[in-house]
């Protein structure tokens, strides 16, 4: 079972079968959003009153320290840390755009991609350099 952490406070974001985020929509309304911890599974849960539209960018925040999770790679990607079963840390980047399926997991040497929309982000930072991921 993988754990997910905030890259700023290193607080645990996974509870049970979900990763929990604070998000804001275009109307600046806040809510909690639960995502599947399985890379490539784009199942999400939110309160029925929180309105989002396909194609809308959401702002993702750590629910513990309230830090923005926007990545330094691209303005449309969020960044979290993932600990694998052996305790090794990986960087996970995923799309902030509702309905866009793009996820990247890197250990610093290679990038593993998931999602049919991943081709929208063709360059990826590995170490101190940007490299093409395919």
Image (cartoon, rainbow, N blue to C red):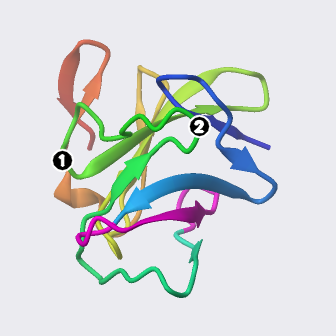
Residue named by callout 2: 64
Which residue is nearer to you in this view: 39 or 133? 39
Q: Are marks 1 and 2 in contact (CB under 8 Å)?
A: no
Q: Quadrant of the N terminus?
A: top right
| Residue 35, numbered label | none
Q: Say if the magenta span includes residue 35.
A: yes
* For residue 78, side relative to residue 56 (left or right): right
Above or below residue 19? Residue 41 is: below
Q: Secondary structure at mark 1?
A: loop
Q: Position of residue 112 (x, y in %)?
A: 44, 43
Toward which corner of the image does residue 28 lie, by quadrant? bottom left
The Cα atoms of the two marked residues, 1 and 2, are separated by: 31 Å
Give percent across and percent down for residue 85.
78, 31
Q: Which residues are magenta?
A: 25-41
10 Å crowding of disc 2: few (<14), some (14-19), many (20+):
some
Q: How many marks?
A: 2
**Residue located beneath label 1 in the image:** 122
| In the rendered image, the vertical position of residue 104 relative to residue 41, given as above or below | above
**Can see residue 95?**
no
Give left or right: position of 76 versus 60: left
Residue 47 visible in this rendered orientation of the protein: yes
- Please report the residue visible at 50 percent of the width from the left and 86 percent of the height from the top: 49
Q: Describe the element under mark 2 as helix, strand or loop.
A: loop
What residue occupies the far top of the structure in this picture? Answer: 128
């Amino acid at each position: 079972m993988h754990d997910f952490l905030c890259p700023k406070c290193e607080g645990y974001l996974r509870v049970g079968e979900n990763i929990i985020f604070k998000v804001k929509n275009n109307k600046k309304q806040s809510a909690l959003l639960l995502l599947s911890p399985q890379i490539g599974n784009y199942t999400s849960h939110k309160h029925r009153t929180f309105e989002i539209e396909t194609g809308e960018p959401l702002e993702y925040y750590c629910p513990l320290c309230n830090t923005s999770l926007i990545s330094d790679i691209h303005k449309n990607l969020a960044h979290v840390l993932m600990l694998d079963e052996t305790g090794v840390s990986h960087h996970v980047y995923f799309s902030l755009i509702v309905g866009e399926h793009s996820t990247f997991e890197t250990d610093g040497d290679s990038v593993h991609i998931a999602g049919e929309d991943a081709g929208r982000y063709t360059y990826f930072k590995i170490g101190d350099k940007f490299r093409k991921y395919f």
